[in-house]
Image: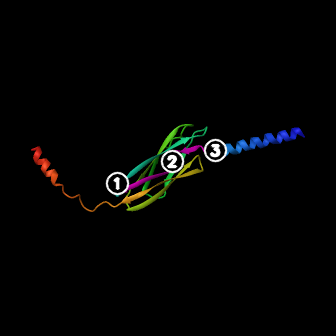
Amino acid sequence: MKKIVLLLILIIGFVAVQAQNATTDVLEMKEMEFDFGTIPQGKPVYHTFLITNKGNAPLKLDNVQATCGCTTPEWNREAIAPGATEKIKVGYNAAAEGAFEKFITVTYNGNSTKQIKIKGSVWKAPVGSAPSNASINFLKQQMQ
């Protein structure tokens, strides 16, 4: 009877360790969201998300896809070695005025996914050129 109980305890322990290892995510992200704050219309902005391979095998980013064409992710297509850190650069073109919230899906190691987000607000650029500055003419005369 003691042998059966001991065997059951060993089996349960083994299964628990295997289940814990199976749920450990190999892709660790320093941040899942970035807020650009208020940015000017017509000026593209960029942010770099850092990822680390926490697994024991190479990590492959299969795809990094944004929800619309105004958001452009760039990433290294090569496998990431265990313990190594890599970057995902995300650009936003800031063409439309107002608040924005964009999601980027990171697909890795075949079928695992994570979602990162960028957000902010775009303020409308003024129409026309900036007003003339009388001080510039004064400075030009002083230089002559």
Task: Please state which of residues 119 and 52 is positioned toward the viewer in this rendering.
Answer: 119
For disc 3, the marked residue is: 24
When asked about the image quadrant of residue 7, the answer is top right
Give the number of the mark in front: 2 or 3.
2
Question: Measuring 27% from the left and 62% from the top, which residue is drawn there?
Answer: 127
**What is the x, y in percent for residue 133?**
18, 55
Residue 29 colored in magenta in the image:
yes
Distance, label 2 to label 3, CA atoms, is: 18 Å
Work out which quarter of the rendered image holds the C terminus and state it: top left
Q: Secondary structure at mark 2?
A: loop
Question: Measuring 51% from the left and 47% from the top, which residue is drawn there?
Answer: 31
Give neighbour class at mark 2: few <14, some 14-19, many 20+ (Cα, 10 Å): few
Distance, label 3 to label 1, CA atoms, is: 40 Å
Q: Earlier in the sequence, mark 2 or mark 3?
A: 3
Amino acid, disc 2: Glu
Q: Secondary structure at mark 1?
A: loop
Amino acid, disc 1: Lys
Q: Earlier in the sequence, mark 3 or mark 1?
A: 3
Residue 111 colored in magenta in the image:
no
Work out which quarter of the rendered image holds the N terminus and state it: top right
For disc 1, the marked residue is: 43
**What is the x, y in percent for residue 3?**
87, 38
In the image, the segment drawn in magenta is 23-39
The circle on residue 31 is: 2
